[in-house]
Amino acid sequence: MVALAIAYFQFRKKESILLSVTLKPLFGKRAEGVLGTLVDSATIFATVVGVATSLGYGAIQINGGLHYLWQVPESQTVQMLIIAVTTVLFLLSAMSGVSRGVKFLSNLNVILALLLLVCVIATGPTVLILNNFVDSIGSYIQGFFRMSFRTAAYDVAQNRWIQQWTIFYWAWWISWTPFVGIFIARISKGRTIREFLVHVMIVPTLLTMLWFSAFGTLATHLQTTGIELIDLDTENILFGALAHCPFGFFMSVLAVFLIFSFFITSADSAVFVLAMLSEKGALHPTNRTKLVWGVLLSVLAGSLLAAGGLDALQNVLIIVALPFSVAIVLMMIALYIELEHERNEMGLYIKPDTYPEKDKPFRSYED
């Protein structure tokens, strides 16, 4: 929703690529004043917090994979080195631009992820994975509303689990909505809304369902056959599961490389977006601004690791996500108002009767 709103207002309404402009149908010129400044500042803060948390967790998991494969010590020193090396790489990627380094790494990630997925399905309990894939989709659809409102009010253990995992992940992704939304919007020029929804919602959702079915079924199958994966640290469970597959070492090496490349891709995209926001929505921010944000993100992630503050940052993420959940609802309402206004102005049902003049889009907050 955030990506659609930003892309629509930027490319259709000829506005800047800032979250504040998407609220103009509701607040008019006030969205350019103090209110807009607050929204855009909160956008930067949420992006920094969300990405710094990801950098910290990414370093921990890469360190876990290196330890499992080659007995590299699990320590803060190693994790700091991982962050330092990654910082250099994602800054080089971000400075090369969206169409070069960022695009290359994104395509590489997809290819490697599909390769690892195919390997797990082919060498794991294939029939069980496919059966679980179909069964889980039905369970998900059936339990969607119940799970969405579930709090386990009378079960203390379940309530704690929901807070530590479900709500945390919801908050984490809400804190990422400005960054992911702006980046998706930035690369979606020329798409229709229908194409946008198919590419952004349906295809990734189906691939995600297949991914969780493959890796979740593999781990669960190993656990039920007597292999105690739960005795491993969280960051080592993936590698412990892959170790029991044919070509397990190769797949574990591929997984470490994939985590590393996803780590770089997330960071270079975040740096690009933060630079855009800092320069009032500029589509091509300067390398100097990217460099500043890249260093700041890495320093923050390293500081949190050194202070043992990643767990505490979970609570910060949840706090940050609360106002953004309200902002997302307002963006949805504003987007609907603007789409309905344009439909009425164009006489749109199947084909429009009227088109706006060039560089003079229909705007509900101006017409």
Image: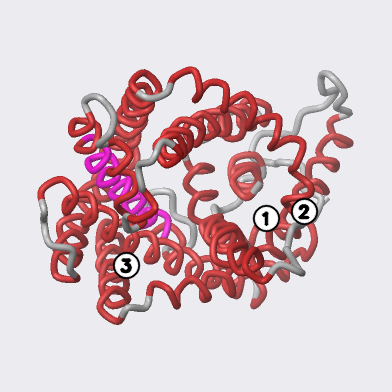
Question: According to the image, label 1 marks what residue?
Answer: 22
Residue nearer the viewer, 242 or 110: 242
The numbered mark at residue 334 is 2
- Where residue 133 appears, x then y in whole percent? 57, 26
The numbered mark at residue 317 is none
- Where residue 85 appears, x then y in whole percent? 15, 57
Give yes or no for residue 259 being in the magenta stretch: yes
- Residue at image position (72%, 50%) is 147
3 vs 2, front mark? 3
Q: Looking at the image, do the residues carrying marks 2 and 1 touch, with CB atoms under 8 Å apart?
A: yes
Give the Cα distance between marks 3 and 2: 32 Å
- Residue at image position (42%, 67%) is 48
The numbered mark at residue 297 is 3
- Where residue 56 appears, x then y in whole percent? 32, 64
Identify the element where label 1 is drawn. helix
Q: Quadrant of residue 42?
A: bottom right
Residue nearer the viewer, 154 or 278: 154
Mark toward the start of the polypeptide (3 vs 1): 1
